[in-house]
Image (cartoon, grey):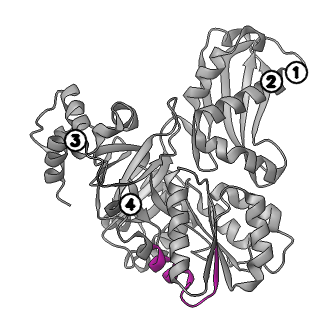
Amino acid sequence: MDKISLYQNVQETVKGYTKFMTTHQLTKAEKWTDIAICDKQNYLLAYPIMELIRNNSFEKCFLIGASSGFSKSGSVLWLKQSSDEAGYINKVKSLLSHDYNIDKKSTLIIVSLALGTWIGGMQLASAMRSLAGKTDGVVTATPGINLEESVHIAKEFGALFDQIIWVTNPSSINIIYSLLKDDKELMNAKIYFPVVGEYFTESFRETISKKFGHQADNSFVVKTGYGSADTGDLGIESEATIKLRKFLYNNPETSIRLFADKNPPMFFIKNDEAFMETIDGNLIVTKNQFVPLIRYNTHDTGGILQKETLKKGGVPESILNQLPEEILFIFGRTTDSVIFYGTNLNIYDSGDFLSSLDQSYAYGGLFEVEKTNKESIDYIEFTIYVLNKSNDLEARYQKALIKALKSSSNEFAAKYNELKTAIKGDLIQVKLKLISEKHKAEKHHTIKR
C-alpha cells in the first residue's frame, strides 16, 4: 500500500483527522515518522463519528456496528462500507475448505459469539450464514452467547454431520466441554474451534485438542485470526505459524532468547492491505477503509518479525522454509485491562466506580483483580480492601460490580447472564480483606497476570 498517498488523502478529506493533526501541531509532516500516533482515546473517542469519514459523506456506509472496546462512554460506534469486507466470504470459505475440508465433509457451523451490534460476532454470523447458503453440506446455527442452546443444537443435530465447526471465544470452550464431556460421539475428534477475541497459550491449544479427542499436535482444533472492529482483519494463523509456535513452546530456551518469555507470542500471516509498525512495543496500524486509520495504536504488544531474526535465534530451516519473509506477532493487550470471554474490562473504570460508592461500603481505596481458573472455567476475581466488614458486604460489592460492568459495556451485559446460566454461578467473584494501616493512604489497584 502507498501509505504516504493515503496519509495525504486522509489529511485532505477527513475533518476529524485534520483537527487531530492541528492539535498535535503537525499540519504538514516532513517524513512518515513525524506523523502523530492516534488511538481510541485521542482520536476515535475525541471526534464525532461523522468527522472520521471522508468529506463527512455517509453515502457509502452499509453497516453500523460497535467495537468491543470497553470505555466510560460505552462501545465505539463503527461504520463500514461494503468494500471494507470485499471478498470476505470467499476468504472465509477458502480458509475453512483448506483447514477443515468443508467442501468434502458435511459440516455444522455453530456461531457462539456476542451478536447484536458487535461487529465481530455480527460479521462472522452473517458470513457463515451466507457461506452455508452457497455450499452444499454446510448448515449454520447462530445461537450467540447462549452456550446451553449451542450445546443443545450440537447434541440434537451433531450426529447428522461429519464435523462441527464451533466459532466462539477461547474462554468459552471449557464451558462447552463441561456441558458436552459425557457425549462420546461428539467428543471423538468431531469438533473444531476457530476462535476470536483473546490471546491463548500453546498449552491451551494442546489441552483442548486432547479433551475433544484429537491428537495434541493437531494445528487446527483451535485456530484464530487477529484483528478488531476498528482495524478489521490484520492476520491469520496458518499451519506454518502454528508449527513455529509449537516449536518455541517445546523449546522455551529459544523462545526466551527471541522474546524474553518462555511462552511465545501468537504468529500470523499478515494482511498486506494494512501497513504495520512497532513503536515502544505496541503494534501501530495504517489502513484504508471507511474510517481510515493513520498510525493507529492498537495497544497490543507485537509487531512485524523478520524470518532472518528467527533464523539467528535458532529456529530450524524445516520450519523457516514454510514461512514468508515477514510475519506478524502478538502477545496481547498492553492496556490496563483484563479480558472476560473476549470482552476487555477496563480496570481503571472499576477503580473509579469503587471510589464513587457511599460510605456504607467502607471502601479502603485499594483492590486487586485476578483472572482465575477453577475446574477449567475462567473467573474474574476482585479482592477489595475495606475499612471494616459486615455480614452482607461481600454480596453487596459483587452485585454492585456486576451492575456497573453491565452498564459500561453492552457486550459484557449481553454475555454475562447467558454465561452465568451455563455454569450455574457467577463469573465475577468478590472477596473482602481488611486494609492495613500502611494501605490507608494508597489509592491504586493491581492486576495479577
Q: Name the residue rendered at 45%, 63% in the picture.
A: 267
Q: Nearer the viewer, residue 194 or 435?
A: 194
Q: Amino acid at mark 2?
A: Arg
Was residue 97 drawn as part of the magenta stretch in this picture? yes
> In the rendered image, is residue 354 in sight?
yes
Q: Is residue 254 visible?
A: no
Q: Mark 3 touching mark 4, by CB under 8 A? A: no
Tag nearer the camera, 4 or 1? 1
Question: Could you say whether the residue bearing mark 3 is in a helix, strand or loop?
Answer: loop
Give the magenta range.
92-109
User: Closer to the camera: disc 1 or disc 3?
Assistant: 3
Mark identifier at residue 95 = none
> Which quarter of the figure has residue 281?
top left
Tell me the crowding category of disc 2: few under 14, some 14 to 19, or many 20 or more residues within 10 angstroms, Cα based.
Answer: few
- Label 4 vs label 1: CA separation? 49 Å
Q: Which residue is mark 1?
A: 392
Q: Residues within 10 Å of mark 1 (few under 14, many from 20)?
A: few
For badge 3, the amino acid type reads Val
Does residue 275 appear left or right of residue 245 in this picture? left
Q: Earlier in the sequence, mark 2 or mark 3?
A: 3
**Tags 4 and 2 in contact by the CB under 8 Å rule?**
no
Tell me if label 1 and label 2 are in contact, CB under 8 Å: yes
Q: Are marks 4 and 1 in contact (CB under 8 Å)?
A: no
Cα separation, mark 2 vs mark 3, equals 47 Å
Residue 396 tag number: 2
Residue 51 located within the stretch drawn in magenta? no
Amino acid type for the residue under numbered disc 4: Leu
Between the residue at mark 3 and the residue at mark 4, the CA separation in whole angstroms equals 29 Å
On the image, the x and y values in percent for residue 271 come to 34, 64
223 to 136, vertically: above or below: above
Q: Residue at x 76, y 52 (%)?
A: 377
